[in-house]
Amino acid sequence: MRKLLFSITALSIIFAASCKKDDDNKTVTPTPTPTEDSLGYTLNADITTNRTLLAGKTYTMTNLVYVKNGATLTIGKGVTIKAAKGKNALIITRGAKIQAVGTVDSPIVFTSNEASPSYGDWGGIVMLGKATTNTTFNSQPGVGEIEGGVNNSNGDGLYGGTDDNDNSGTLKYVRIEYGGYPFQPDKELNSLTMGAVGAGTTIDYVECAYGYDDAFEWFGGTVNCKHLIAFKTLDDNFDCDFGFRGNVQYAISVVDPSQADISGSNGFEVDNDASGSDNAPFTAPTFANVTVIGPKENSSTTINSNFKRAAHLRRNSRISILNSTLIGYPSAGILLDGVKCANNLTSGAMELKGITVAGITKAFDTVSNSSTTLGSLNTYLTTTNPTWNNASVAATTDAGLKAPYAAGASFDPTPNAGTVLTTNVVTSSKLTSFFNTVSYRGACSVGDTWWKTWSKF
């Protein structure tokens, strides 16, 4: 009996071992990638649970689409989203995410569905986060209502909170074209509107083209961005408000000489808030390696009279601009506006260093109340502080860029070797670990190609 039990037990062990071995070695068939979207190819309703748009497909947007309730919208590489003309936009609400990751060869494109698209055909992309701001909404400090008329009774257009590391997702290798629909008079959306977007968010290789209002506008928040392109936007290219404190490296802006906004179109427009108050957190971003190409190639270029300055710094803002070049604006290179801004510069809260201004008669200018405090801004930024390595040159060609005013494939914002933009870079404590250490001014090095293939010129 014992022998029989032993035999049965031994056989059971052998059988179990062989089953275990088979389980360990069996081939697992991967879940196939879907080739069709069971939800259809139209975005026309709120996204309240996770959704994925299939790589390489074309979708149509026909509504204000809110991603909400903590949902994530994932967009595959090579997706094209065509928005119908009118009050249509994609709004990523607080707590929700967008994961739009294209590639250099297969970017994700948001564009107009019109046969002949134009400025402001649709609303653009709105990202709303939980980072800190200096604004107030309905007596709630730190909360704002995003401009553009997309807020509703659910508060889906509100932004702001207490989490500066908030994560609204990823935009990478993304183009946003023909956005900025005028939802309300003087309250248009922008191509990419960011309200209190936190530092956990990734924004890299994003182009905003043919926008009706601003290309990129930050309302508070701490998001960091690299490789931005603003192309032929009607109003401002880089607009910062309500306590934005993120970092930006490598940015290019190009304008259409005939198209500008009645409010006055600038490369940078920067405010602490609408009244220039002392409300904290202060608008204090750091921009490095920016190339701002204005409308006026030379003295014979005809431009829209609404173009103003390469950078209008006002209302108690504390932006720092480092190792950059500003060319071809009619009114000024940098206009420092207000006593508070002048004090921010002299205290070191604002830094303007390593800047080459080309083809602009008033390279560094102030309004009267700033100059009372500071004196000549041109003298202060150059002669008084020579180690800041700021300079102006007479013509846009003196900046040494290859072809900043060429069209299409001939456009080239890179510097020629041995020209002024390839020397005299500055260092600063504001260049944190986020920033790459480079040896040139402007958005590109000699022979650089980061702006090619995925973008549209």
Image: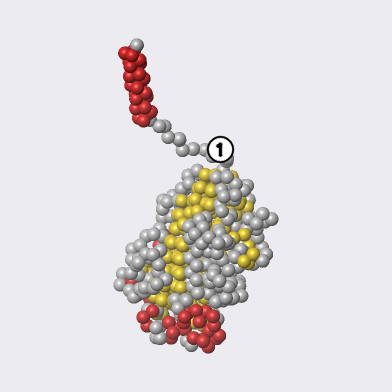
Relative to 167, 433 lies left or right:
left
Nearest the eye: 366 or 317: 317
Relative to 320, 152 lies left or right:
right
Nearest the eye: 160 or 13: 13
User: Is 432 drawn above or below residue 277 in the view shown?
Assistant: above
Location of the N terminus by quadrant is top left
Residue at far front of view: 2
| Amino acid type assigned to the residue bearing label 1 in the image | Ser
Is residue 265 visible in the rendered image? The answer is no
| Residue behind mark 1 | 38
Nearest the eye: 256 or 279: 279
Residue at image coords 46%, 48%: 77
User: Is 38 drawn above or below residue 192 in the view shown?
Assistant: above
Task: Locate residue 430: give its quadrant.
Answer: bottom left
Residue 370 placement (x, y as % from top left): 53, 84
Residue at image coords 51%, 62%: 164
Residue at far top of view: 1
Residue at image coords 42%, 69%: 288
Residue at far left of view: 418
Task: Locate residue 258: give its quadrant.
Answer: bottom right
Is residue 334 visible in the rendered image? The answer is yes
Residue at far right of view: 153
Residue 84 placement (x, y as % from top left): 61, 51
What kind of element bears circle 1? loop
Residue 133 placement (x, y as % from top left): 56, 66
Nearest the eye: 12 or 331: 12
Residue 131 placement (x, y as % from top left): 54, 61
User: Is 41 drawn above or below residue 90 in the view shown?
Assistant: above
Task: Locate residue 397: give its quadrant.
Answer: bottom left
